[in-house]
Image: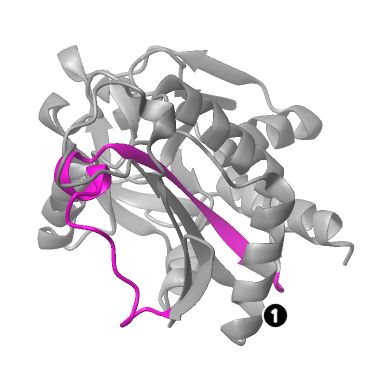
Amino acid sequence: MIVYLNGQFLDSDQATVSIWDGGYLYGDGIFTTLRLYCGVPLDLPAHWGRLREQARALELPLPLEFPELENAIASLAARSGRRQADGRIRITISRGGSMENPLPLRDLEKIPPTILITLAPLPEDLPDLQSRGIPVITLGAFFSRGNVPELKTLNTLPSILAQRMAAAAGCPEAILTGPEGILLEGAASNLFLVSSGNLLTPATGAGFLAGLTREKVLNLAKEMGIEVRQKKLDGRHLEAACEVFVVGSVREVVPVVTVDGRTVGDGTPGPVTRKFQHEYRQMIAGLLGN
């Protein structure tokens, strides 16, 4: 695999990061993940804008400008043989460091960051997950994002542990809850419920990261004339829902057919979820000019 690392294109076997890098030592950094469609990165300006905002919040310098980022991704796609293909892009920006200053606390803007861009194929099972739906488990507040949920930092251990717990239970995703069982998000997705003809989703500010795909689904709902209620949700709402689905940049819209072994609806992807899958793909086709 070819990767972009600090201005160079390298084979992944040859790409190395300093042992003093803040991302490696402390999880001091940020990242974003997005889809490549037919060689085109979806919503790159929005992902870059979020990275810039979060970098400012962490006093993390960004020496890369947007045109350079565009060129880097286009070149990476070409070098990876994915100029006209789909894929999964991850942009990781971590704090640099040195043996003399392994835990930088001052003059952070003077420390060159590590910038890594990778491009991988989509998961082979993605079409099946989208078609059949997935089982999920719910997990407690221990697995939530913590004190800075609005930042997509490299401190992802709770999410990783949640995904491992889900995998051990035979589930591709876990639904995370907060204090008093408040519904938050998936370990790697945002959550939507369909109940009594309404679309429900946890309200922002509850302690989760509101993703860019979530925003797209909310806009689609408005265009489709579906009422959306962003509110405090808990397990009772989850049990009462006739449809459940999760969304993310890579997986798009994925139906949830069982929760903790309990069947959602009739155990198959529901009509509202299918409609959102269709409209989402139509939106993508429109953005790509197809």
Q: Quadrant of the C terminus?
A: bottom right
Image x and y of residue 284, in percent:
75, 56
- Element class at badge 1: loop
* Tally of marks: 1
Residue at the extreme bottom: 81
Q: Residue at x 51, y 70 (%)?
A: 8
Local crowd size for mark 1, using a 10 Å CA cut-off: few (<14), some (14–19), many (≥20): some
Q: Amino acid at mark 1?
A: Arg
Question: Residue 22 in magenta?
Answer: yes
Q: Quadrant of residue 147?
A: top left
Q: Can residue 160 be seen in this snapshot? A: yes
Indicate how the structure is coloured in the image. one colour
- The residue drawn where x is 58% and y is 37% is 212
**For residue 240, above or below residue 120:** above
Judge whether 234 appears above or below 6 on screen. Answer: above
Q: Residue at x 27, y 37 (%)?
A: 28
Indicate the position of residue 141 as horizontal and vertical percent values. 15, 25
The image quadrant where one finds the N terminus is bottom left
Q: Is residue 225 magenta?
A: no
Could you tell me which residue is drawn at 25 percent across and 24 percent down?
235
Report the span colored magenta.
Answer: 11-39
Residue designated by label 1: 83
In the image, residue 146 lies at what x, y percent? 22, 23
Q: How far across and how far down the image is residue 203, in percent?
A: 46, 16
Q: Nearer the viewer, residue 202 or 290?
A: 290
Residue closer to the observer: 8 or 250 = 8
Q: Is residue 148 left or right of residue 103?
A: right
Answer with left or right where residue 171 lies relative to residue 123: left
